[in-house]
Amino acid sequence: MPPKSNPEPSLGSPIPLGVETRRQILALALLFAPAWPISAAQGGPPLMLAKIYHPGIPLQNYWVSEKYDGVRGYWDGEKLLTRGGERIAAPAWFVAGWPAVPLDGELWAGRGQFQKAVSTVRQQTPDDESWRGIRFMVFDLPAQGGTFTDRLSALALVLQKIEQPWVQAVTQFKVASHMALNKLLIETVKAGGEGLMLHRGASLYQGVRSDDLLKVKTYEDTEARVIEHVPGQGKYAGMLGALLVEMPAENGRPGKRFKIGAGLSDEQRRAPPAIGSTVSYRFRGFNDSGLPRFATFLRVRDPVER
């Protein structure tokens, strides 16, 4: 049952796949056996996670792609999972004929349609009409051995066999300079995109956060856990003044705590995010104590994003 319509990715050009490339792919399939079994039995799948881009990296070593603002989706070879390991109730036609190998990607409803993607994915009873507006933008083969550059060729072959227009490989391309990268970032954001991703060509797939994968945005953003509701004063008396949040622990040390007061609507101040929930916030670098500067509330992180 094909979808009626879908958003169109717009950056870069697909990687050509000629006869010689096909032969190379077959050779790679024999050379690179799966590096390790991937399973969501213990919590979420071991996904490769991104750090924040920083100037000075050797850009020639990285592939560039658009950062799709959707819900991380992981196909474990049998079922579609969220980042946290919960099963996604996708329609049977959406995943029909998918391979018995893991696929890592983004369930995407188009630029500026993040909430649509979340509301569709979180439904326990899938709505066909909503799912016709979703694409699975695949960017990696987690269980495939070899470098990311090697895996791109293998991924192209795997997705060709699926032959479904709503399952697409994320277009990967090279950028010549940091100036060109910044220009592309500005153009992407103006067109409604969220940002860019950089993926080191020589990297293996590892379920950790590292410089092998970097996100490039016009602002930095991350998550923190709500620890306490700080009462408001003045015009916010009787409402929330700020959220006391805790950053994730690092290297065995407890996460640092700070307050987020900016970016909250009056409605959110009257009914604040629950203690223990995870919130996303944007910021501009860190001060000398390691706390984020100009932290601004973005949204409560939905369970399907975990």
Image (cartoon, helix red, strand yellow):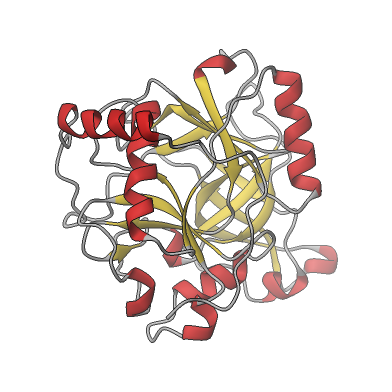
The quarter in which the C terminus is drawn is: bottom left
Q: Is 84 situated above or below 290?
A: below
Which one is in front, 112 or 160? 160
Side of 221 relative to 105 (left or right): right
Instruction: Count the marks.
Output: 0
Instruction: Name the one closer to the observer, 241 or 50.
Output: 50
Residue with the most extreme right position: 235
Depicted 164 relative to depicted 262: above or below: below
Q: In which quarter of the image is residue 201?
A: top left
**Eyeballing the image, is 228 above or below 133?**
above
Whether residue 145 can be seen here? no
Q: Which of 299 and 127 is in front in this view?
A: 127
Q: In this view, does 121 lie above or below 54?
A: below
Q: Residue at horizontal 69%, vertical 44%?
A: 295
Quarter location, residue 261: bottom right
Q: Position of residue 124 (x, y in %)?
A: 37, 83
Image position of 220 (left or right of 144): right
Image location (x, y in percent) of residue 167: 44, 59
Residue with the most extreme front position: 19
Residue 62, percent from left and from top? 52, 23
The answer to whether residue 26 is left or right of residue 210 is left
Quarter residue 83 falls in: bottom left
The residue positioned 39% from the left and 61% from the top of the image is 163
Which quadrant is home to the N terminus?
A: bottom left
Residue 293 in sight from this viewpoint: yes
> Percent position (x, y) of residue 270?
69, 76
